[in-house]
Amino acid sequence: MKKYNLTILSLIAGILIIPASCSKDFLDTKPTDQVDATSVFQSVKSVWGAVNGLHRSMYIQYNSIQAHGGMDGLLRHIDFLGTDLLFNTGGNTHNLNVYKWIDHRNERSGAVLYWTNLYRLIGNANQILTKIDGITNVDNIADFENQKKHIKGQALAYRAWAHFMLVQLYAERYVPGGQNSQLGVPYMEEVTLEGKARNTVEEVYTKINLDLIAAIDNLQGYARANKSHINKSVAQAIQAQVALVQGNWELASTAANAARQGFSFMSFAQHQEGYSKISNPEFMWASYVQEDQSMYFFSFYAYLSHNFNSGVIRTSPKSIVKDLYDKISPTDVRKSFWHPNAVATGLPAVPPGGVRYNYMNSKFKAVSTSDSRGDFPWIRVAEMYLIEAEALARQTGKEEQAKDVLYLLAKNRDTQYTRSENSGQALIDEILIQRRIELWGEGRNFTDLKRLNLPLVRPEASVEGAGGHIGSIAIKLYEPAGSKNWTWMIPGAEIETNPHMVQNPA
């Protein structure tokens, strides 16, 4: 029997996820369905529908696994594996084995199936890239060639981003300055049913960068309809993220600087709105979730908000570690995101019957107790300031520029912040602490530890609500840098169906 690669099962029979309606509003994100790919590539207008399908696939329910509520579920996993977000109780089992460092090392777990989800996104992007050049101007569109370029640019950016997520998780870390000949992931650039072998980590990053360069070029002049679409700034932001992992400090700083142009910081009042509105000026790339597109108990905000009436939030609201909380200045607006005395003060507001734990978060807020929706930010402009500052601080002779960039962000968060007087590693450490505070809960902690080749060190507590990881709940309190446990296992079904695939060391 012919073996099919799990990475491209979504392409069998030419199926592409696109919006069911391709009307005059084709530039808006619509509810989606699956249709025959052949009918999609008849005109550039209908291909815009396929592009909307890529945007929509960022926040769909992929399967019956509750944690798989869109790609934001993957970002939750990345923070659940880290140091700074803690589970207060083991009573609610959702994602508990992720937190314990069990699921990502189990080839049969639901967690590792993000491999499949990411490759499905790649497969649909490749469908667009394969067909777009052959489409003729049947609609007599004046800027037809530019529209084709803008479609191609978004598909290339999605392909690069998805491979970037895959190689960070399912391969050993990229070593700046090293050969990086270790096995990476298959870089899929064609529509095929044939299983592929793993490229090296270096090859994967080379192809990611080529796709991003092409994406940026194709997105020149593109004015997007909304923030769910990828424009040049977003492609440059992804390029900055990739360069940071590779230790390409010059590119990381210049790409981050270019990406952040035209974006402003949020106000103090907007910080309190729950990081869930696409209108937030700091959201560079985000998914707008319409009322008929709710994922209910699969949503990001059904896990990490403080107010939605889900079993997870009622019984197991998530907290910040005291060690990091104590590093936040009392005059920093972000200090208000966490509540060290939640039990005594009764803050923050929780759903009916919900419990409170000290240091629990109110950073994220769902629409209401009965509506788990929220517009999820894939990239915020604050991250670009942090990347630029870190990359400048790591370049010879650019520490003062790094301090200037860090000051812009930190002063916005804390009116009492004064320009850093640190230098060398102390300056880098200050920037990294700001990064941990700023991006808490947004899916950066585990991958940051891995890129920096740092161990997992979870501050321990003996009782609930003390701001530390409880050993009997977390189980994993320490993991040395560079161990095999930092690499996710490839799904067993992929190993069984793809004769070219090699599993990671167990």
Image (spheres, grey):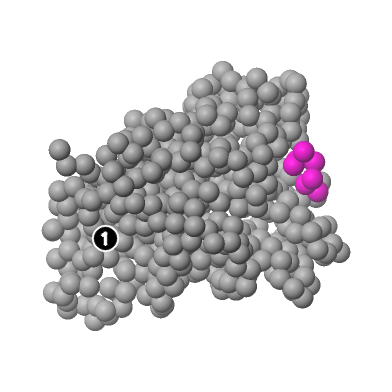
Q: Quadrant of residue 162?
A: bottom left
Percent across and percent down for residue 6 are 29, 43
Q: Is residue 326 magenta?
A: yes
Q: Quadrant of residue 60?
A: top left
Q: Residues within 10 Å of mark 1 (few under 14, many from 20)?
A: some
Q: Secondary structure at mark 1?
A: loop
State whether residue 211 is above or below residue 140: above
Q: Which residue is disc 1 drawn over? A: 190
Residue under the point 15% across and 38% down: 1
Residue under the point 60% across and 40% down: 483
Residue reaching furthest bottom?
142
Determine whether, in the image, residue 268 is placed left or right of residue 234. Answer: right
Determine whether, in the image, residue 315 is placed left or right of residue 458. Answer: left
Residue 117 appears in view: no
**Amino acid, disc 1:** Glu
Residue under the point 41% across and 33% down: 107
Residue under the point 36% across and 34% down: 492
Percent across and percent down for residue 443 are 55, 46
Residue 395 appears in view: yes
Tell me the magenta residue range: 323-329
Q: Nearer the viewer, residue 447 or 502?
A: 502
Q: Is residue 154 magenta?
A: no
State whether residue 9 is above or below residue 63: below
State whether residue 223 is above or below residue 81: below
